[in-house]
Amino acid sequence: MQSIELTAKTAEEAKAVAADKLSVSPDQIEVTVLETVKGLFGKSQVRVRATVIAAAAPAAKPEPKAKSAKPKPEPKVEAEPKAEVEPEPEPEPKKQAAPKRTPRSKPAPQAAAEGGEESVVEASQEDADALLAHLRKLLDAADFEVEAKVKKIEGRYVSLEIDGRDLGHLVGKHGEVINNLQYLMNISAGRKLGNGVRCILDGDDYRSRREEKLTALATKIATQVRDRGEEAVLDALPAFERRIVHKALSEMEGVTTYSEGEEPNRRVVIAPAD
């Protein structure tokens, strides 16, 4: 089946755009929302995967039943008397095994790739250079006194590092500004590259410090969950930070993790393991 990923203001708008791009009717498009993020100015956009589904085939009309001719009565023939045969005893019915009951299972633990399926895409140096050029263009347009460079390329992710006098303004309170800028960069990556490559923005090791903080918090809460035998629900986190929590607790005995809710209020649940 054909499928594409794209971003639009609403799922309906994304469905219409996908139908036009794939040259099919909107009725033949199935939309799966991958991410919903609030923009810098309070406007939200959705990133979706649009898949072409086969149109339902028209039901075949039942063929009219042919009228069967009445059979002609056969001439009666006197049957010869048969010898009486003692009937064989009927076999006893076999006892059927009781069906096995399937226990109700908890939601499966989340994979490291929270918010979408893990892609086989590998980012190239050409992808990294294109993202870096676009980031520098945005920073120059905003007149920030900062510099940007490629930090590392890992799988489908390109990490770009920002440094300079105005870095504090770009990180913002609790990372809100740099997270929103990262979201805009990934929207641009989807449109310009169109190959599933994603961008991670960092500055002054903010991502490393945030990962350490989230890991410590998740480990502390998971220990309480294991001791008390009760679930705990974390505050809403963006997809790339939920991945950090799932990864941090993936090898911890006695607990399991999964996500629930819809973006942008999707949360990680830490639960006791069976």
Image (cartoon, grey):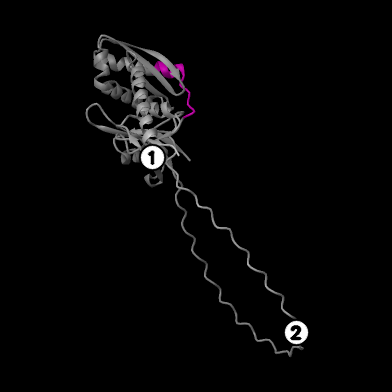
The answer to which of marks 2 and 1 sits earlier in the sequence is 1
Amino acid type at circle 2 is Glu
Q: Which residue is mark 2?
A: 84
Regarding residue 243, the answer to whether it shows in the image is yes
Mark closer to the observer (2, 1): 2
Q: Secondary structure at mark 1?
A: strand
Q: Which residue is mark 1?
A: 32
Q: Bin the neighbour count of mark 2 within 10 Å (Cα to Cα): few under 14, some 14-19, many 20 and up.
A: few
Foreground residue, 253 or 251?
A: 253
Q: Nearer the viewer, residue 183 or 68?
A: 183
Question: Is 195 rendered above or below residue 102?
Answer: above
**Quadrant of the image occupied by residue 116:** top left
Q: Position of residue 4 (x, y in %)?
A: 42, 35
Mark 1 is surrounded, within 10 Å at the Cα level, by few (under 14), some (14 to 19) or many (20 or more) other residues, namely some
Residue 132, how many percent across, how many down? 37, 16
Percent x, y of residue 41: 22, 28
Circle 1: residue type:
Thr
Name the residue rendered at 47%, 59% in the picture: 59
Q: Which residues are magenta?
A: 119-130
> Does 274 sit left or right of 160 as displayed?
right
Tally of numbered tags? 2
Asked whether the viewer can see residue 47, the reply is no
